[in-house]
Structure formats: C-alpha cells, structure tokens
Amino acid sequence: MSIASLFSIALGAILVENYVLVQFLGICPFLGVSKKTDTAFGMGMAVIFVMTIASAATWLVNKFLLIPLELEYMQTVAFILVIAALVQFVEMFLQKSMPSLYQALGIYLPLITTNCAVLGVALLNIRADYSFIESIVNGAAAATGFTLALLLFASVRERLQFADYPKAFDGFPIALVTAALLAMAFMGFSGLKVF
Amino acid sequence: MDTLMAIIYAVLVLGLLGAILGLVLAVASKLFEVKKNPLLEPISNVLPGANCGGCGYAGCSAFAQAVIDGTADPGGCVVGGEDCAAKIAEILGIEVKKNMRIAAFVNCSGGNNAKKKFQYIGIKDCHAAMRISGGPTECAYGCIGLGSCVNACPFGAISLVNGVAFVDHERCTGCLKCVNTCPKHVIHPVPYYADVNVACSSHEKGAVLRKICNIGCIGCKICEKTCQYDAIHVIDNLASIDYEKCTGCGECALKCPRHLIVDSKLDRSPVVSESTAVSN
C-alpha cells in the first residue's frame, strides 16, 4: 500500500468509476438538489463528510464484528444500521460542539443517511477487499467524485434556464438528457489508468 | 435445525447491535442536548413553513427565534398575515403592533402603450435585455415586460398583461422577491390595504413623456389639487401617494386624465388605455 496505489484508487473513484455518472449510485440527490450550485455544494460537502466516516465505520464493523461471527451475508442490513446511527450521532455532536458547521450541513446531513451512494461505497469497499486506509481514501474520493458530478450538473442546469429548448422537455426530461450527456462525457475517462 | 439456529443467531447479533447503537444515541441525545426555548416549537408550528425569507430572516425557525428574542415583531411574517401574527402574540402573551402587511405593486402600465426603441429578440429575461442600452422600452423607468418577476414569484401571483407585469393582489404574499429581482426597480412594496396606487414610475417631463408613452404620468398635478387630505403630491414630474395620509376616497383616481391611478375599490385589473398603442 504505497502513496501511488492510494492515488490510483482516488483518481479511479473520482473520474473512472464516478459513483453518479458511471455507476449510477446516488441518483436521487443528483436530480433533487442540483437546481442551484450553492445547494449542490452544501450537499456535496455533507456527502464527503458522511461517506468518509461511513467507510471507516463500516470497515471496522465488518472486520471486527461480521467476519469473526461469520455473518458477512448480513452486511447490507448491518451497514444501513451503522450508517444511520452514525449520522444521527454526528449530527447531535455537531449541533453541540460546532454549531456553525451544523448550520451549513444541517439540512443535508439527515438527507443522506440512507443514500445508496453511501451504502454503495461501504459495500464496494468490502468487495474490493480494501484495507482500512484504502477504504477511507476510496470513500472520500468517491464522495469528491459525487460532488464534482453534482456541481457540474447544477451549473449546467442553471444555464439551462436561459436555453431555448422545446417546451415538452421542460423540467425533468431536459435534466435527464443533460445527465445522459454528462455521463457520456465521463465515459471518456474509462480507459484512464495511472499504474 | 442449522438454518433455524443461523437465523436466530443473525437476529440476535443484529438486534444487539441495534440496541447498543440505540443506547449510544439515547445517551448522546442527553449528552449533546442543546437547550431550545420551549416556545420555539409552538411558534414554528403556526408559521407557514415556506421558508420564503420574506421576513428578512433565514427561514421560519430563524424568524421564530428572532420573535422570541424580541428583535422581530410577531407581525413580521408577510405570508402568514394577521392570523399568524395573532397566534404568535397569543403564544407569547404580547400585543401585535400595527398591521404591516404589504403587497407588491407594479408602478408601470406602459407595456404595449409605451414606445419601443428597438425590437428585442433574445433571452426572455429582463436583466439580459437591460444590458442592451438599458432595455427595449423608450421610457427609461418603465417595465421591460419580459417577465423576470414572473419567474421570481414563488406564489404564481405575477403575470404579463398587455406587455406589462401585473401582480394579482389576492395571491401576493408580500415576500418581495419580485421587488428585488426587477432590474428597472419598477415594482414597489405598498401597504396591502392601500386603496389607490400610481401605476407609473416615470420622472420624464410631461411633454417628453407624451411622445413615448400613451399612459404614463405627465405631472399635471390634477390629483394634487383634487386631494382633500394632502396625501398625493407630484414630485419630480411623478405623482406619489403618502399612504399615511391617504384615506382611499378615490377622487384622484377619478380625476386623473391618464387613468393611471388605480383605485382598488373599483377595480384591481391592469390599466388599459382607451387610445390605441403608440406605433413602434
């Protein structure tokens, strides 16, 4: 586990295996909070925060609880439980000790408790057999990729307000067309390999 | 039997995990408890919860906190109106100050009555049109009529009638999003119960204005002479109403030769000039 392999994991998670545009995880917030760039940014920051700590926590739960007890098949349920409790705990902790951060993330934190991208990163970390450090890097990088996709998409949607597209496409249809074009653009990274 | 044991085992382990996490959360909620004013919740409940920001605070709960702190008046919620103010006052056990409900009013009735400098073809947005030599309307003060305010209104109260923005008084909650959006600053907050309003913003001299708009205020001062209550004055070639003094008698609206003083007791529909539109 060298710095180079961690960098490779991070770059892969941000661009090549982008959670939203390539693996289609976390589509709900991708469409839901992408109308303005500042809300998209707030959501992105909350996702980075939660995904990183969720990766760490679920790795520990898997390693020291599920594997010794031979309960790996209960991963999904156990992870949902752990992530939900963790987010609740962090929210309470932030409200008490860091009110300003709580104000900034406040609305978005509970929203992503059961986000499939968060659960996805936990499960994929296990499937890829990552170590503890690798899991955390992968979680943070995947969330960064999520934020990148969300910000790009929100910027495009802001511009769309002034675009002259057919009326029948108004609202979600044009958003989905945009998302498809973005996803195709990200396909360009598929051959990218650092090491 | 093995399967049954495995199921019971899994249920036990996960149940235990859930119970431990639940316990941790319960302890944490006591440990990290943030003291909230007990009045905050009932006040938040009576507020509309639209988080429109019309009161000037970040959202409904921020406004509720400000009311408790005494920095905001219970009547400050423009959407909730009198009912809401009365309920808040009841919870707090205080008196509501004077009713301050406001509504937006478009001080322009130009639109198709106003002459155009050029034909604008482009993004349907007033801010974009403003960048091209101050917009297509000849009148520097008038409504561009491309509907930036229509898009800004969260309550669907604004529509374009006869080429000029028109606020539906019934639907207007007074959040003033349109007032802040309009690049010409032609929409103004007025008291909700104001009976007469001047539907023009032009400070042009009468002679100039007659050439560019069929309907705008020419500053003839007939309204000023008519008013018995000293409530309407022509300042810089434009009639303006002192809402403190106005009794809403409506005399000025009847006498105005341009029919641009709107008397809401008679009609709140948009001003339409009888003469034909200025040829462009």
Image: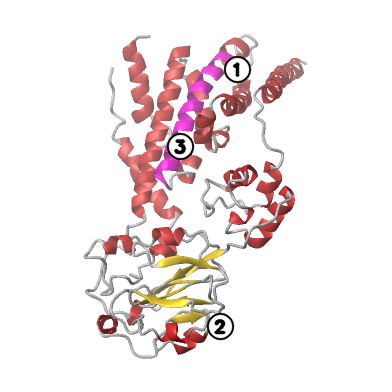
Q: Nearer the viewer, residue B17 or B76?
A: B76
When the figure is inspected, residue B165 is found, relative to residue A129, above or below; the finding is below
When the figure is inspected, residue B41 is found, relative to residue B115, above or below; the finding is above
The picture quadrant where one finds residue B80 is bottom right
| Chain of the residue under label 1 | A
> Which circle marks residue B249 in the picture?
2
Task: Indicate the amino acid at tag 2.
Answer: Cys
Q: Residue at x 21, y 65 (%)?
A: B133
Disc 1 crowd, CA 10 A, few/some/many (<14, 14-19, 20+): some
Secondary structure, magenta segment, majority class = helix
Residue A70 % position (x, y): 63, 12
The number of numbered discs placed on residues in the rendered structure image is 3
When the figure is inspected, residue B132 is found, relative to residue A60, above or below; the finding is below
Instruction: State yes or no: residue B265 in magenta.
Output: no
Task: Indicate the amino acid at tag 1.
Answer: Glu
> Which circle marks residue A72 in the picture?
1
Task: Say whether marks 1 and 2 touch (CB < 8 Å).
Answer: no
